[in-house]
Image (cartoon, rainbow, N blue to C red):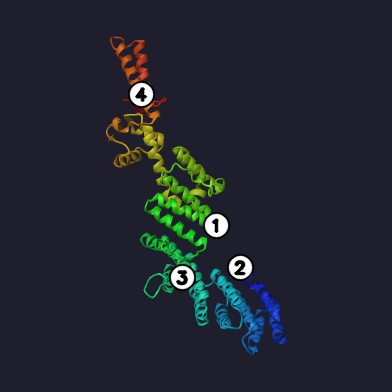
Amino acid sequence: MSDEEFIMDDAADEDYDFEYEEDDDLEDADADIENMYYNAKSIKDHDPDGAIRELKAVVDGEKEKGDWGFKALKQQTKINFHRGRHAEALDSYTQLLSYTKSAVTRNYSEKSINNILDYVSNATDVGLAEMQSFYDVTKSALEDAKNERLSVKTDLKLARIWLARKEWNRLAKSLKELRAYCTSQDGTDDQSKGTILLEVFALEIQMYGEVGNFKKLKEVYNSTLQVKSAIPHPRIMGVIRECGGKMHMSEKNWAAAQVDFFQAFLNYDEAGSTQRVQVLKYLVLAHMLMGSDINPFDSQETKPYKNDPEIVAMTNLVSAYQRREVHEAEKILRENKRTILDDPFIKAYIDDVLRGLRTQYLIDTMRPYSRIQLGYLAQQLNISVDKVENLLISLILDESIKARIDQVGQYVELDRSATSSSKPRYQALDKWKSELDRAGASVHGKHAGGAASGSGASIGGSFLRMGVGMGGMAASLGPSLR
């Protein structure tokens, strides 16, 4: 709520007047008090001190606490807070809270309290201790008025503020009080308060995620799955599922992360939250990391977002990933830093995506050969030879390939019996290689007898070099068909 909206927010007062006018309550109002109130409102912009005096007179002029006194205190709080007189604003606000027991309707008082707290929370010139004071007097008054529902809502509002401001100690204290409210006498979670319990869990999960305490995050996340009696707002479930997905990602459990991100997307979509777009990016990320051949944009729920300006880069990245176009994927990342890499969470896992692409590219590239130069692979991937070695070592260790690396000769030699594929295209390549070997040996044999300088040997030698070099590459860099 802006300053102007706060100071001019009188629509609620006018609605309140009309509500009482229907009940004929205004007929009993003292005309002088009413006139003082409206006179104060008319001069508050150019004479705030005069307005404050008039409003105090309104409060003092009422024989019993009533609606005019409540509205006068509300105006005093607004004027003083707007002028930076926070202590005076707190005094009038504290006095206003005493009217919530019986002087005004519960709905009107709750709306007024929420408006004031929202403004206090968003004000940049208010210290944390001052802001805490407004919440403390609110909670005390609501507990005294036996308004448990609004008291808990106020505690949740304050906890959300501490989370947004990353005030972890203050947040932990607020959450401890909220957890106590949601705990049964036997020390277990009170399932009858399931909806509030889930809101508390959502705040705890976000806190533990921010501070990197994934052990506690997992405990709370598992607790959320045990809550059965709640009817939570879909946004709350979106938060829980999103944090659950991030937790699974930290454990490299890509499949579980994909499930949670999809559920988070559905919940945010139902709530109309813009966070659905960001979570959809996380869903795409998990899909790529789990090596799924299913396009995440093929589902009915995600398809409408396929061409969203914020999503299209991820759409293209998925397409490149599934085609195993590592160079295209790198180009997409370079050209779309804002929509992809500006998110720290996505950035943290992009190296895993590229690593997966590169390892698959290596497998596909090496499959037809028995020996291939490391320099050639490095050139194809546009990375260093050391990085190629690391990728090959990981492939060998997890038994994706059976091979040995010759660091002296700078090549990798594959076990042909272990790497031959049953796929038709690789069977054809294997057959072509064998035929090429036989043809080369035959040509060489026919011309070896004294015709080394003849045209036949030149043809045979060129033929063999072409096979070794592959596509015009230098023979020392290309794969060896042996």
Mark before the other along the chain sequence, 3 or 1: 3
Graded by Cα atoms within 10 Å as few (under 14), some (14 to 19) or many (20 or more), the crowding at tag 4 reads few
Q: Secondary structure at mark 3?
A: helix
Q: Which residue is mark 4?
A: 431
Q: CA distance from mark 4 to mark 3?
A: 69 Å
Q: Which residue is mark 3?
A: 193
Q: Secondary structure at mark 2?
A: loop
Residue 2: give its label: 2
Closer to the camera: disc 4 or disc 1?
A: 1
Q: CA distance from mark 1 to mark 2?
A: 28 Å
The correct choice, above or below, for 443 with respect to 32 in the image is above
Residue in the foreground of this view, choosing between 212 and 376:
212
Mark before the other along the chain sequence, 2 or 4: 2
Mark before the other along the chain sequence, 4 or 1: 1
Q: Are marks 4 and 3 in contact (CB under 8 Å)?
A: no
Mark before the other along the chain sequence, 3 or 2: 2
Q: Which residue is mark 1?
A: 270
